[in-house]
Image (cartoon, grey):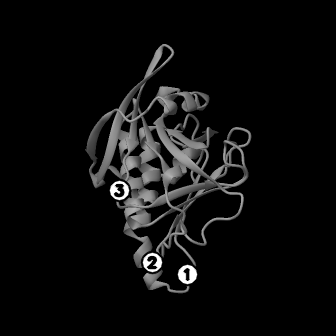
């Protein structure tokens, strides 16, 4: 899997951050939150076509392999798909990062403002084998004490932050990748099926945890197989 990126080094106070921003490509994806709050309101919805889903999966794999980087997907610049948004929804960016960075979401607005037009352009190449097969994922492990491989949601500056371990990005990335590898075939096989989606939850897989106040606890990711643009 390849992802075209721009790599930035940004200093904020005493700290320096490596930000890997996905560059525009053939894929289309857009992230919406309801309401007008920085954290996205009550629900988070991400729509992606097949190429966009491929870019998302590559970003997930990159986050698993890059514990010292913030992987930034500037989805606010995406083109809205016709009929897949409602009045009052706000577009949001997405940032994936390893929990060891302990990056405060409140600092993101300052960091993003310093990205500018500089940085080093680079094409990241990550192997598809980074993701486990679904039958290799131990979904029962989150019941054990000390389990730390969930994704955690936060929001600031109209950006959703997904923070987790490398393992968390690998297992959730396997689901994200299914939007590219399985969605089209599933919809062709079952024509009456309304859509193909993947839902990621704050905390444990399949359970809605307790994210920070004002941040939705679930991200609903939908394969947009008939993407028609409105603007």
Contact flag, marks 3 and 2 (Cβ < 8 Å):
no
Q: Mark 1 packing: few (<14 Cα in 10 Å), some, or many (20+)? A: few
Where is residue 54? Give x, y as percent. Answer: 37, 59
Return the disc, 1 or 2, that comes first in the chain's sequence.
2
Disc 3 target residue: 25
| 39 vs 119, nearest the viewer | 119
Q: Residue at x 71, y 58 (%)?
A: 88
Q: Is residue 155 above or below residue 75?
A: above
Question: Local crowd at mark 3 within 10 Å, few (<14), some, or many (≥20)?
Answer: few
Choose top left, top right, bottom left or bottom right for residue 115: top left
Do the residues bearing badges 1 and 2 touch, measured as CB atoms within 8 Å? yes
Where does label 1 land, which residue? 193
Tell me the tag on residue 142.
none
Q: Residue at x 47, y 47 (%)?
A: 74
On the image, the x and y values in percent for residue 158 come to 61, 43
Labels 1 and 3 touching (C-beta < 8 A): no
Which residue occupies 47% across, 41% down?
Answer: 96
Residue 147 placed where, x, y %?
Answer: 54, 38
Disc number placed over residue 186 in the picture, else none: 2
- Comparing 94 with 96, the one in front is 94
User: In x, y percent, where is residue 20?
Assistant: 38, 37
């Amino acid at each position: 899997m390849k992802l075209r990126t721009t790599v930035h080094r940004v200093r904020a106070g005493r700290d320096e951050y490596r930000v890997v921003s996905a560059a525009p490509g053939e894929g289309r994806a857009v992230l919406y939150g309801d309401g007008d709050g920085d954290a996205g309101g009550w629900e988070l919805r991400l729509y992606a076509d097949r190429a966009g889903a491929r870019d998302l999966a590559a970003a997930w794999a990159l986050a698993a392999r890059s514990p010292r980087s913030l992987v930034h997907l500037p989805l606010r610049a995406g083109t809205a798909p016709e009929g897949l948004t409602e009045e009052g929804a706000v577009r949001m960016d997405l940032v994936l990062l390893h929990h060891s960075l302990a990056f405060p979401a409140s600092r993101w607005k300052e960091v993003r403002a310093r990205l500018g037009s500089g940085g080093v352009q680079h094409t990241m190449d990550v192997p598809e084998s980074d993701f486990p097969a679904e039958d290799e994922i131990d979904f029962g492990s989150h019941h054990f004490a000390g389990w730390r491989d969930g994704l955690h949601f936060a929001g600031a500056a109209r950006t959703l932050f997904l923070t987790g371990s490398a393992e968390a990005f690998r297992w959730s990335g396997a689901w994200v990748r299914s939007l590219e590898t399985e969605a089209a075939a599933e919809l062709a096989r079952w024509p009456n099926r309304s859509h193909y989606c993947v839902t990621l939850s704050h905390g444990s897989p399949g359970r809605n945890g307790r994210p920070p106040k004002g941040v939705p606890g679930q991200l609903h990711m939908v394969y947009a197989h008939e993407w028609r643009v409105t603007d």
